[in-house]
Image (tube, rainbow, N blue to C red):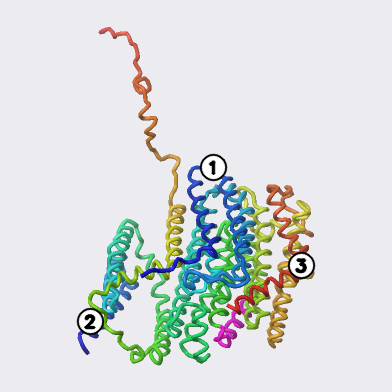
Amino acid sequence: MTAAMPNFLPVAPEIFVFSMACVILLVDLFLSDARRGVTYLLTQLTLIGAAVLTVKGMSAAAVMTFNGMFVGDALANVLKLAIYGVTFFGFAYSRDYLRERGMYRGEYFVLGLFGVVGMMVMASASHFLTLYLGLELLSLCVYAMVALQRDSGQSTEAAMKYFVLGAMASGLLLYGMSMLYGMTGSLEISAVRKAIEGLSADNVILVFGLVFVVVGIAFKLGAVPFHMWVPDVYHGAPTAVTVYLGTAPKLAAFALVMRLLVGGLEGLAVSWQSMLIILAILSMAAGNVIAIAQDNIKRMLAYSSISHMGFFLLGIVSVSQNGYSSALFYVVVYAVMSLGAFGMVILLSRAGFEAERLDDFKGLNQRSPWHAFLMLLVMISMAGVPPTFGFYAKLLVIQSVINAGMIWLAIVAVLLAVIGAFYYLRVIKLMYFDDADDKAPLGGPADVRVLMGINALALVLLIPWVGVLMEVCRAAIRALAVA
Amino acid sequence: MDFKQLAFYFFAAVLVFAASMVITVRNPVRAALFLVLAFFSAAAVWMQLHAEFLSITLVLVYVGAVMVLFLFVVMMLDINLVRLREGFGEYLPIGGLVAVLLVLEMAIVLGSGPFGIEQMPEPAPLPADYSNTRALGRVLYTQYLYPFEIAALILLVAIVAAIALTMRRRKDSKYQNPGKQIQVQRGDRVRLVKMRAEKKS
């Protein structure tokens, strides 16, 4: 029996990142602590190289390879580019934080890169098996990264909780997939889609499998009532890891939702629509209300991420091309905002001091007006105040919900977003109207300050090009529908 | 009921019994041993499904390697059994109720219709020289190459993570430097001290 050689070209970015991660793993072995910067530079170069490869490999039509296990379409490319960008910034923010805490070792970057490979695999999965393996690859890296600060009881506890709940979620997801396989006879997403068209939408076993799949996805997204791990993990993990796990994996989770629910199971949309509505409303309500009671900024941002995940699910709920593309836009904007917020938490931390409490943001304006301004931009964008990207993202999602004829849902979403605005504005109040306890001016290396500036200003200055970005998202979603 | 069915029910019953013993038995060593029994019965069930390779691998890898390692760890750790059991009885009624309900619901949904036994005709018997292993190897390195490679990557990550989380270079640990040992001169180790012979008093 002979097998045709698969086309390796579309997988070039994955292969590149993986090989570079192995190279970095070896190079790091021979570096002294003083020259650890080489590891960091190589890591960042890897991400840039992967971006170049992805851009070069882009083609108008979707490319399938490895016997339909891998698909390179516009959605995958957009998500991958966003993942590289977000991770690049995240690594840059983390560098000093890691060095000051004795965690500046190759493992952080290597595990981070392996996690990126996992996310890339998920972004271009066209088979349940690859989707699941990508998810496991990502999760394993993140579990280890959370526990990387070995002597901290808090991190270990967070990693333990994350690991146990994550393993359970994977089990649920797999069980759901096995049910779908039992009914449709295939694991290939396009074949599953075709098989479901031939069955009735209220087939008991299909819905049974779907429930497990949705629960698994909700666990991974951190949507209420499967959100218990989010605040503990965000809080317990070293902030350098929180900035990693609070940003790029959300994009991968979007890929999970799109590939599974929309790509494979759109025939069951009637069933998952109502499930997602419940998840979305609960997430927005619980996330926004509980965030108000937090005095730890990492916990507050964790609850805020729960509410944002609820909001993004609204875009999926509308079951339309417009809805999906607005959800994609929302997730990308959320990743950038979250990056900015956690980046600022890192910037405020120093050796032996974690700027975790909200009080640490008191009087930031007196210490550094520029940074206070950047944080202001991030916060109003998260709250959804015009003229920021956060506002447009929320607007587009709400629009798609209204177009789908669910006006009540749009009203609920807006009301809950208004409640959420309270705690974002509280941060602004603390920064501008309260006196600083600690008047030391803000430090931080020059490149991080520049990147931080780009990160936050992008939320406002890129507004004239919002149409272009929307069009990119639309094209990405259209590609999925064609495939 | 022919012999095949009898064997299946026997192994399945042992499997369920062993699995429930794993989580209820008091002693962790016994729990590990029950897990071995569970793996054996599962391997026997797989054997009946004509999956000889997987079944033998299960015994070799899990029973032979993983469980032995596991037993070592369990025996080396000083586990406080009382604390381990804390809260088990407390959550048992509600947890058990939920579990029983879930099993019943799943049985109702899955027990009928498309998963019924009459829907699955017995596959045609395979020739005597049919090699399960060869068939697996063929698809593993052709059709399933991509997932296979990702699985390998996951194992690599597991190694990296395990080492990153457990390896510590202790400052006070003593180790030898062979280069220095070879280059050592007599003068480094022995110091000749001239002393005047002591007088007898």
Residue B87 location in percent, x, y? Answer: 41, 71
**In the image shown, does B156 or A300 lie closer to the viewer?**
B156
**In the image shown, does A106 or A100 lie closer to the viewer?**
A106
Q: Residue tagged by mark 2? A: B7
Residue A176 location in percent, x, y? Answer: 46, 79
**In the image shown, does B56 or A356 lie closer to the viewer?**
B56
Nearer the observer: mark 2 or 3; the answer is 3
Q: What numbered label is drawn on residue A465?
A: 3
**Principal secondary structure, stretch drawn in magenta:** helix
Query: Which image quarter holds the C terminus of chain A?
Result: bottom right
Are tags 1 and 3 found on a single chain?
Answer: yes
Residue B180 location in percent, x, y? Answer: 39, 30
Task: Kindly report the distance in space between the C-alpha atoms of the residues bearing marks 2 and 3.
Answer: 69 Å
Q: Residue tagged by mark 1? A: A33
Are tags 2 and 3 found on a single chain?
Answer: no
Between discs 1 and 3, the one toward the N terminus: 1
**In the image shown, does B117 or A377 lie closer to the viewer?**
B117
Q: Determine whether, in the image, residue A372 is placed left or right of residue A34.
A: right
- Tag 3, which secondary structure? helix
Q: What is the chain letter for disc 3?
A: A
Are tags 2 and 1 found on a single chain?
Answer: no
The amino acid on which the numbered mark 1 sits, given as a three-letter code, is Asp
